[in-house]
Amino acid sequence: MKRKIDFLVIGSGSAGLIFALKVAAHGKVIILSKSNMEDTATSYAQGGIAAVTYSPDNYEKHIEDTLKAGAGINDKEIVRITITESTERVKELIEWGTHFDKEESGKYALAREGGHSEFRILHHKDNTGFEIQRALSEKVKAHPNIEVFENYFAIDLITQHHFNEVVNRYRKDIRCFGAYAMNEKTGKVETFLAKVTVIATGGLGNIYQTTTNPLFATGDGIAMAYRAKAHLENLEFVQFHPTSLYNPGEKPSFLITEALRGSGAILKTKKGNVFMKKYHELGSLAPRDIVARAIDNEMKLSGDDFVFLDARHISKNEILNHFPTIYAKCLSIGIDITKDMIPVVPAAHYSCGGVNSDKDGRTTIENLYAVGEVARTGLHGANRLASNSLLESAVFSHRAAMHAIGGFRQIDFRENVPDWDAEGRVMNEEMILITQSKKELQAIMSSYVGIVRSNLRLKRAFDRLEILYKETEDLYDKSILSKDICELRNMINVAYLVIKMAMNRKESVGLHYSIDYPEKKEN
Ligand code: FAD
Ligand code: SIN
């Protein structure tokens, strides 16, 4: 089946929905979601969205904090654009129906997280993302020009490659004509032709064993863009959140928001020793990369499986008002956080790198935009400042939409696009092959490409991955197409990029720490 649409948006998180809402007044939009519409990392966001609202905060302070967290390798123009447009974008989320917590005075109640010099995080208790997703989803569902296709798995972007033209990364005129996506109910691959295609597919956390990311976060957008020969960067900078709840077997790992540390919770060893001041003057509220590395080190020194986060001195009233989700979750596994310390471990959380996109969300492929976590805008540099991600989605989805509105009428649909070629796929392989390879991949990434890296570990990961790559490509060529085999293939593609980019970075900076190059290179 072939469909023609002005705007094809792959992903129903904040990035995709904001883009869709902005362009929908000008043309027809289809949003694809590989799961249900609300199953997004956006819905999981706890802490909030960073934006400049009241003095004494100002744009310069937020810019400086973002650059400091990113170890200065951020794109300075992008940082300035993002922060100076933050106030406007947050106002818009409020106009669209998002409720952020307020103080009795009527002012927004601002929180503080690691690396922020001011209280500037707008939040809705400890489930801000859920509230943003709710507001955006309601607007999208009510919009006559937007259709949401749930349980549609985008497999590949359509480019000249599908017309048997030679496409390589140096070719300047690669064009995107839409995407192939599998309708999971029928198992059939459908063709979506679009004037403008947007990848808003979120993160890649599931290439690791332990992640806060929802199960769908398998780096599909990154892999699709890579196969289509888009430029990608900075994938070595995978952010590990320092404090996910230690609850073996639970997937995804439940996050304990940094805002709890912003409210005074303190990291302690299993023996009860406060340790963060050894690593940074800001103690438990140091930037995320430093806290995650410190916890990793303490766990290696002690041999313990977790450290503790102590929130017992915070009043029960504050806990119940600001952190009801965390309170309830911990209680459900027998931990009363007003009386007991919380066992926590770092978990893969966010990809700072991704598909290169410019200040208008454009990728290096014509008519293809990338927004949200899948994009590498240059905002985060070597390490994302907490709560700058929802902000990045809001700013660049807006800018991408404005750019796309300006140009989409001049774009023609590509004719004679071939249907998905399913020839040769006969083998219905046992799931065990796929699940076992996925486990192996996650073990490789967690053991060798985690918080602390080395030349030897990366080389080992690379060699092991090559075996998995060959086996999986062979399986993919012969098998009946399924979401599981596609995800595995994507995860292997993405893991390859993370390892390759980590190997190429011969220094320690931000989230990439190598024992062989412990210093940052001077530019
Ligand atoms: P997502 O919200 O993840 O949406 C991705 C969409 O793409 C989904 O709809 C998915 O179905 C779809 N998709 C993916 N692949 C395919 C495919 N092949 N075919 C079709 N559809 C596909 N950031 C902050 O700024 N503040 C916070 O407080 C915060 N807290 C967080 C807490 C947790 C637990 C997590 C995991 C992240 C948190 N983040 C936070 C990060 C932030 O939530 C995400 O970076 C951001 O929401 C990403 O939005 P997105 O729209 O790019 O992607
Ligand atoms: C958190 O609430 O600690 C997560 C914030 C983020 O990832 O930006």
Image: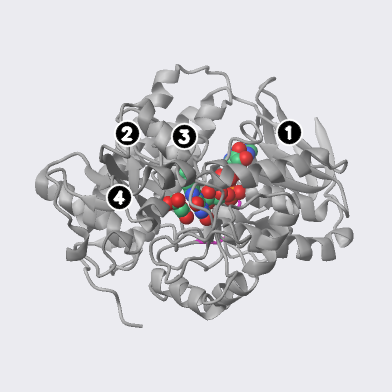
In magenta stretch: residue 194: no
Q: Quadrant of residue 80?
A: bottom right
Instruction: State the colouring used for the structure image.
Output: one colour
Q: Which residue position holds label 3?
A: 488
Q: What's the residue at 36%, 47% (across, down)?
A: 315
Q: Secondary structure at mark 3?
A: helix
Q: Quadrant of residue 193?
A: top right
CB contact under 8 Å: marks 1 and 4: no
Q: Looking at numbered disc 3 in the image, what kind of residue is underneath it? A: Leu
Residue bounds of the magenta highlight: 228-232
Q: Upstream in the sequence, badge 1 or badge 4?
A: 1
Residue 397, image x, y percentages: 68, 58
Q: Secondary structure at mark 4?
A: loop
**Mark closer to the observer (2, 3):** 2
In magenta stretch: residue 229: yes
Q: Secondary structure at mark 1?
A: strand
Q: Looking at numbered disc 2 in the image, what kind of residue is underneath it? A: Asp
The local crowd at label 3, few if under 14, some if 14 to 19, many if 20 or more residues have their Cα within 10 Å, is many
Residue 244, image x, y percentages: 35, 43
Residue toward you, 450 or 62: 62
Q: Which residue position holds label 1?
A: 149
Q: Which residue position holds label 2?
A: 336
Q: Which residue position holds label 4?
A: 449
**Mark closer to the observer (4, 2):** 2
Establish if 355 lies above or below 200.
below
Q: What's the residue at 48%, 59% (across, down)?
A: 111
CB contact under 8 Å: marks 1 and 3: no
Establish if 471 lies above or below 268.
above
